Image (cartoon, rainbow, N blue to C red):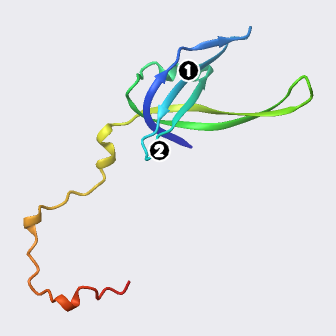
Amino acid sequence: MEVQGRIKMIGETQTFGTNGFRKREIVVTTEEQYPQHIMVEFVQDKCDLLNSYQAGQQVKISINLRGREWVNPQGETKYFNSIQGWRIEALQAEASGDNVPPVPPADAFEPATNLKEEDHDDLPF
């Protein structure tokens, strides 16, 4: 799976526990009708992938969804989800328009001269 958007924030690498577990978070804002702020975590050696990125850049992040179960001291079972990144790529802002063929100028077409008023709604749908 992938998430695309503009980097809003990149956190510092955090280290946890005696075994040195490392985690680094990035927030990407999607660019759609209702933008979403998606937090993705990179863990262990993947933390270093974020070193060459900064806020404002357009990126595509390859992700895995992770879920885990936890039983609290009262015996209640809780479930937690996380979004883990494993690859990040910079996108060019104008890349979305690269695959669109150029539109010829309007004067490249001959004007239609054989239009009849009664033919205005003869489409089959």
Among numbered discs 1 and 2, the one appearing first in the sequence? 2
Question: What mark, if any, has residue 78 been given in the picture?
Answer: none
Relative to 110, is 123 above or below? below
Residue for point 58% across, 25% down: 42
Q: Residue 14, percent across and down?
A: 61, 13
Question: Circle 2 — which element?
Answer: loop
Residue for point 86% across, 25% down: 72
**Towards the viewer: 118 or 78:** 118
Q: Residue 38, percent across and down?
A: 54, 34
Q: Residue 32, percent across and down?
A: 43, 45
**Towards the viewer: 86 or 2:** 2
Q: In the rendered image, which residue does mark 2 sit on?
A: 34
Q: In which quarter of the image is residue 57?
A: top left
Label 2 CA crowd tier, 10 Å (few <14, some 14–19, many 20+): few
Looking at the rendered image, the quarter that the C terminus falls into is bottom left
Q: In which quarter of the image is residue 47?
A: top right
The furthest residue to the bottom = 118
Cα gap from disc 1 to disc 2, whole angstroms: 29 Å
